[in-house]
Image: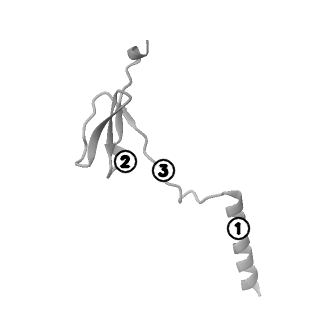
Amino acid sequence: MSGIVTRLVAGGASVTRGLLGIRNPQMLQSTAGFKVKSRLKLRCKHCYFIRVNGRLHVECTEHPRHKAREIFNVKLLW
């Protein structure tokens, strides 16, 4: 009898979590942001340069932590 109750409670908890939108924090994937550097370099064979809005960026298909971008020149704003 207690096995049935345990299964019902466990099933109800998972349904409640699904309805409330509560996720397991281990399931969330974090993404690496851009590092801002004055000198950019390619760190591995998968890295490549691209130019976005007049600024150089380094993208990497293999290691997202290699992403970097140039410092924005504030003098260009005026």
- Label 3 vs label 2: CA separation? 10 Å
Element under disc 2 = helix
**Residue 31 point in image, percent of width and height:** 45, 48
Which residue is identified by label 1?
15
Give 59 or 13, whichever is nearer the viewer: 59
Relative height, residue 9 to residue 55 (above, below): below
Crowding near the residue tagged with mark 1, few <14, some 14–19, many ≥20 C-alpha atoms within 10 Å: few
**Residue 30, numbered label:** 3
The three-letter amino acid code for the residue at tag 2 is Pro
* Residue under the point 33% across and 50% down: 63
Say whether residue 15 is left or right of residue 26.
right
* Residue under the point 27% across and 29% down: 39
Which residue is identified by label 2?
64
* Mark with earlier residue (3, 2): 3
The part of the image, by quadrant, that contains residue 35 is top left
Q: Residue furthest top?
A: 78
Q: Quadrant of the C terminus?
A: top left
Say whether residue 53 is left or right of residue 17.
left
- Label 1 vs label 2: CA separation? 34 Å
* Mark with earlier residue (1, 3): 1
Q: Quadrant of the N terminus?
A: bottom right
**Residue 5 point in image, percent of width and height:** 76, 80
* Residue under the point 35% across and 37% down: 68
The part of the image, by quadrant, that contains residue 77 is top left
Crowding near the residue tagged with mark 2, few <14, some 14–19, many ≥20 C-alpha atoms within 10 Å: some
Element under disc 3 = loop
